[in-house]
Image: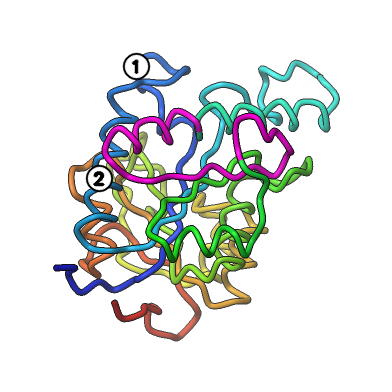
Amino acid sequence: MAHRTAYKRVLLKLSGEAFSDPEVKGGIDPGIVRQVARELADLQISDGTEVAVVVGGGNIFRGNSPSAGGMDRSSADHMGMLATVINALALQDALEKEGVETRVQTAIGMQEVAEPYIRRRAITHLEKGRVVIFAAGLGAPYFTTDTTAAQRALEVGAQAILKGTQVDGVYDRDPRTEASAERYEEIDFLAVLNQGLKVMDATAISLCMDNDLPIVVFELLAGGNIRRVVRGEHVGTIVHATGGAPASGAG
């Protein structure tokens, strides 16, 4: 029997770095990908939650990073988009080994390995219990996968963006370098923008703010966290509209 959840349909935002061992700093760690896949499988199969995923590619190549070495930004960003497809295919393989039917949809045509992104088809897949992984960003340079996550979440009607990170929420300062940093239980979009907090980029935050789409920031690799967030437990930090209660839907 499916458990009652705070969110029926969610979009999980994964950075490319989430796929790699922090000690190695790059590439894909199969163990980490398997752990994420198991958590998503547990969530999708046991709770009946409809799950979409947006993956980054920073563990392989990032268009606006020093590794681009002065390359034309459009070319570098397209390379970054292709890196996200590699991560999406790795996650798809791990999910299917867990018995979860999965579709990868890309914003750049590559029909031999993935479907093109079609909004109505993505929604149909979600309704049929398939995990849909969105890759290649928005298919255009100068847009991050944060913006892609906000855009796709709104297009498919997700009730929240879940952003899995290496820390357990949003802090007023970097907790990895400042021991006195304090974590927010919840914070509104305007405060995130005004304080320059690194939750998602400003375009993504503005999209979520304008459309009242909450973001939950949590530690990805703490076992069971994805399910706890979806069930409405207080995990990490929720970013929501000014003066309003965090939005959620009934399962």
Q: Which mark is residue 23?
A: 1
Q: CA distance from mark 2 to mark 1?
A: 23 Å
Q: Amino acid at mark 1?
A: Glu
How far across and how far down the image is residue 20, in percent? 40, 24
Q: Residue at x 41, y 53 (%)?
A: 130
Outermost residue toward the left?
A: 1
The quadrant where residue 204 appears: bottom right
Residue marked by disc 2: 39
Q: Quadrant of the N terminus?
A: bottom left
Please name the residue shown 40% across and 42% down the image. 174
Does the segment drawn in magenta span residue 195? no
Residue 96 inside the magenta-drawn segment: yes
Q: Secondary structure at mark 1?
A: loop
Numbered range of the magenta stretch: 89-114
Crowd around label 1: few <14 · some 14–19 · many ≥20 (10 Å): few
Query: Quarter of the image containing the C terminus?
Result: bottom left
Q: Nearer the viewer, residue 113 or 148?
A: 113
Using the rendered view, name the quadrant where residue 150 is placed. bottom right
Q: Is residue 90 left or right of residue 43?
A: right
Q: Of helix, strand and loop, which one carries label 2?
A: helix
x, y percent for residue 96: 35, 36
Report the number of numbered marks.
2
In the rendered image, the vertical position of residue 89 relative to residue 11, given as above or below? above
Q: Nearer the viewer, residue 160 or 47?
A: 47
In this orientation, which residue lies closer to the viewer: 83 or 126?
126
The disc placed on residue 58 is none
- At which x and y percent is residue 107? 70, 44
